[in-house]
Image (cartoon, rainbow, N blue to C red):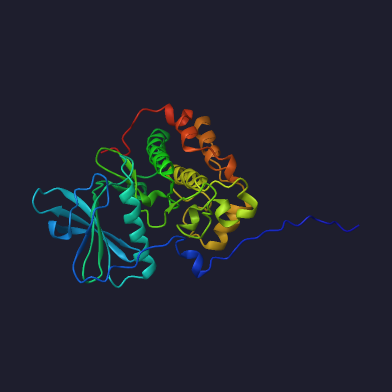
Amino acid sequence: MALVRERRQINLRLPELSDCRPRFPLPLPPTSTTTTTTTTSNNSSNISCNDIEKIHVLGHGNGGTVYKVRHKRNSQIYALKVVHGDSDPLVRRQIYREIEILRRTDSPYIVQCHGSYEKPSGDIGIVMEYMELGTLDSILQKYGAFDESKLSHVARQVLHGLSYLHGQKIIHRDIKPSNLLVNKDMEVKIADFGVSKIMQRTLDACNSYVGTCAYMSPERFDPDTYGVNYDGYAGDIWSLGLTLMELYLGHFPFLPPGQRPDWATLMCAICFGDPPSLPEGASEEFRDFIQCCLQKESSKRWTTSQLLSHPFVCKNPISDLVDL
């Protein structure tokens, strides 16, 4: 007798060029030949390019450079993010979007912007607060995996930041260790809003292929299967769960240590496999917290307010992220 198996019908889109572009209207670069300065934060001190001097490069990537800079008059240290005039138009659109988001935000859990400008050469700059310890990814590489008390500290602060953003109808869409910054006071803040989205309606689609696909939730790959009772904000919760697991394990949860991810492998693991689980030795509170974040059906994931009341977040006092 022939064995007949039910075949699951799937509707997964391969990423096309148009899928990689933001789903929002963005202004074209101004054509004026004079330098333009824009206030970008409720607390902005409106610092222009003429007010600062570069100290050294902090990093490169995505068509731009980040510098450590000093204010010429008061010697205050800032970070300067510059997208160069000859960069890809998509990258330029993303920094315009980041400026728009930062103009709307005012929270101790979001990296603060102190001004922006555009030079006649086309270079666009954002002056931001300087986060001395760098990203959680760089801390992981330097100091190794995080213990649970440090992760509780990270989770609590990132959840406060996401709660604020979601209250402003903003979805980050790219939560990962390299977009979470730490200052000398061990404060963790959310950064990099180039692919974020401002929601106009609760059910606005937010399943385009923007952000880092490794941290995308199942409904971003396969909305027909996992997007029942769609909630765009839930994608940030999935990304937070993967981020915490990566900091705990020391490597990306869906792949063995040292393996480089590719789109097809990640899509299969995220959509067809079970969510990753913590190894033996993890506490029950941490296991349950991660499970609340990594529900494959978006409607079953906990919200920021629910997670902020979770025992894993509440049980540990604030602790240093690194032993200096």
Q: Residue at x 39, y 33 (%)?
A: 149
Instruction: Residue lying at the far left in this picture: please name it.
Output: 73
Residue placed most toward the observer, 261 or 189: 189
Residue placed most toward the observer, 213 or 149: 213
- Residue 137: where, in percent of width, then height? 37, 50
Q: Residue at x 18, y 53 (%)?
A: 47
Quadrant in which the C terminus is drawn? top left
Q: Residue at x 27, y 47 (%)?
A: 112
Number of numbered labels in the structure image: 0
Compared across the picture, whether 303 is left or right of 143 comes to: right
Compared across the picture, whether 307 is left or right of 66 comes to: right
Does residue 279 show up?
no
Instruction: Residue lying at the far right in this picture: please name it.
Output: 1
- Whether 208 is drawn above or below 41: the answer is below
- Residue 86: where, in percent of width, then height? 30, 73
Quarter assignment of residue 1: bottom right
- Residue 267: where, in percent of width, then height? 57, 58
Compared across the picture, whether 44 is left or right of 195 comes to: left
- Residue 241: where, in percent of width, then height? 49, 43
- Whether 161 is drawn above or below 311: the answer is below
Does residue 195 show up?
yes
Quarter assignment of residue 4: bottom right
Q: Residue at x 35, y 64 (%)?
A: 27
Residue placed most toward the observer, 22 or 60: 22
